[in-house]
Image (tube, rainbow, N blue to C red):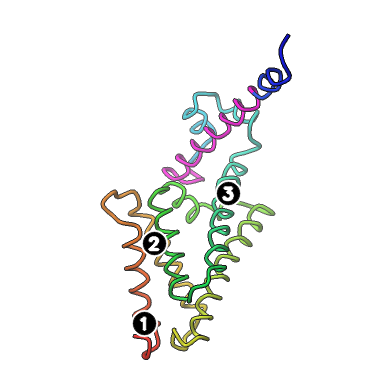
Amino acid sequence: MPSKLDRESASNRPSNAKTAFLTRIRQAALRQFAESGYDGTSMRDIGSLVGVHAGSLYVHIKSKEDLLYQIVGEIAESGEAALQRVEASEVGAIDKLRMLARIHLRWSMANPDAAKVFEREWMRLNGAQLAEVQVKRQRWADAVERIIQAGVDEGTFRNMDVALAAVAFRSVLNANYTCDGDPDVDGVKLADEFVDFLFNGWVASDHR
């Protein structure tokens, strides 16, 4: 007679298989979105990558847009978690921005498809899903502004347009995804060079 453990293991197998297949679908969608863009990707394209007809995908997902939402939302949540750790660290503004740059660039280089989709395709979402992702992205932007403002307040950075400085910081980081995946590029070194480049114009004269 099967034990309780045997029965539970057997009951979990279909669920585990479904989860694994859903992961394959999301990976295929991510790859195709990165290669062809959201608008240039069809459900048939995604189905072909996982070996099923397009109609069979709807057993596992609601829509192509829902797939994009899952992918972008998961990336945003991961970024928020990293940001919270950086903000909670007991270091100055320069070190916090350096930590953020390192985290972001190392992730982008390790996940070039995800970086492309997160930066290029999130605006294809609609309604509540778009609004939710916008809120998450804005929280990240606001945190960067807070860190820079703290640097100004503590005298590390000169008086400047903090909002514009935050845009410059994010733009420099996000521009890098087009060269991600190069094994000869050191993410930490690249992050430090980017941050140092910005800081040459930001740092107060008595901190140089």
Verify whether residue 17 appears in magenta.
Answer: yes
The CA span between labels 3 and 1 is: 34 Å
Return the residue at label 3.
74
Q: Where is 59 relative to 40, above or below?
A: above
Disc on the earlier residue, 3 or 2: 3
Quadrant of the drawing holding the C terminus: bottom left
| Residue 128 placement, left or right of 55 | right
Q: Earlier in the sequence, mark 3 or mark 1?
A: 3
Q: Residue furthest left?
A: 184
Q: Measured from the top left, where is residue 149 in percent x and y?
A: 53, 81
Residue sitting at x 55%, y 24%: 53
Q: CA distance from mark 3 to mark 2?
A: 21 Å
> In the image, is residue 30 part of the stretch drawn in magenta?
yes
Q: State the residue in front, 166 or 156.
A: 156
Magenta region, residue range: 13-40
Give residue 201's mark. Answer: 1
Secondary element at image label 3: helix
Dot 1 amino acid type: Gly
- What mark, if any, has residue 46 been given in the picture? none
Categorize mark 2 by other alpha carbons within 10 Å: few (<14), some (14-19), many (20+).
few
Q: Are marks 3 and 1 in contact (CB under 8 Å)?
A: no
SS for dot 2? helix
What is the spatial separation of the Cα atoms under label 1 and label 2, in whole angstroms?
19 Å
